[in-house]
Image (spheres, rainbow, N blue to C red):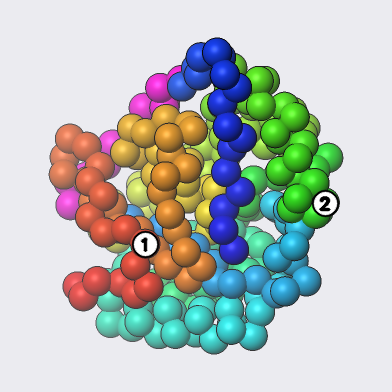
Amino acid sequence: MKLIGPPARPTGLESVASPPPDAPATAPGTVVYLVRHAEVADSAIAMAYGAMDVDLSPAGAAATRKLCAAFAGHSIGRVISSDLERALAMGRGISESSGAELIVTPALREIDRGRWQGIPREEFIANWNADAATYWRDPWNWKSHGGDSDADLWMRGGAALVDGLLAVNGGTLVVTAHTNLIRVMLGVLLRVPTPLNYAFETGPAHLHVLTFDGTAWQHSAQNLDRPPAD
């Protein structure tokens, strides 16, 4: 499903793109895979499901099995996964395929849409459009719906990422999560502020690869349907 992006900036209103927080440093050569869950069931596609625990479609379940199998033989230090079932299915499968330890945490859940969660997508978009001026004054901290802001996503998701980096100690970490969580992680690691980080595309059952060169994170591969060969 296509990511719901922000509303158009109102004419005459300047955007305040706060610089992202500092990206965590780690050992040179560290590799991080950011893996999005597969396609969700038709019953969920028409709504802004956010942090709701929705099922995978039959095609999504098959895509999950296929991507997980592609990790067989890869050297992975740890898999950390959202506890929402659509992402956890991916985390479990990659862990089993690679033999890596699996850590499950609610810190990697998708963005909570607050009062707007579960409403039709069209209604969600209309609500956001109506609140465009508020959004564009502070995109990083915006949460008029009462749920999560991008800042909230990074606060919890970034903490889980740092724990994972410490655990792999220069090795390879796999994160199985959701499109907005991945968008925010990419934005912080690659120094791209909200809302410019909406340019990062992550298809269902697709992944990004980042490497730390000792100074900064590099976007080694993006939106792949399988991991690169080791």
For the residue pair 40 and 83, the one nearer the viewer reads as 40
Checking the image for residue 223, the label placed there is: 1
Task: Write down the residue under mark 2.
Answer: 119
158 over 226 or under it: above or below: above
For the residue pair 167 and 57, the one nearer the viewer reads as 57
In the rendered image, which quarter contains the C terminus?
bottom left
Q: Is residue 2 left or right of residue 32?
A: right
Q: Is residue 152 left or right of residue 22?
A: right
Tell me the distance, in whole angstroms, between the alpha carbons under discs 2 and 1: 28 Å
Q: Earlier in the sequence, mark 2 or mark 1?
A: 2
Q: Quadrant of residue 131?
A: top right
205 over 8 or under it: above or below: below
Instruction: Report the magenta stretch's main SS.
Output: loop
Q: Is residue 19 magenta?
A: yes
> Residue 221 in the image: x percent, y percent?
26, 59
> Residue 88 in the image: x percent, y percent?
59, 68
Tag 2: residue type?
A: Ile
Kindly identify the residue that appears in the image at 51 percent across and 68 percent down: 204
Kindly identify the residue that appears in the image at 32 percent across and 58 percent down: 222
CB under 8 Å between discs 2 and 1: no
Magenta stretch, residue numbers: 18-29
Q: Is residue 220 magenta?
A: no
Kindly identify the residue that appears in the image at 25 percent across and 42 percent down: 217
135 over 177 or under it: above or below: above
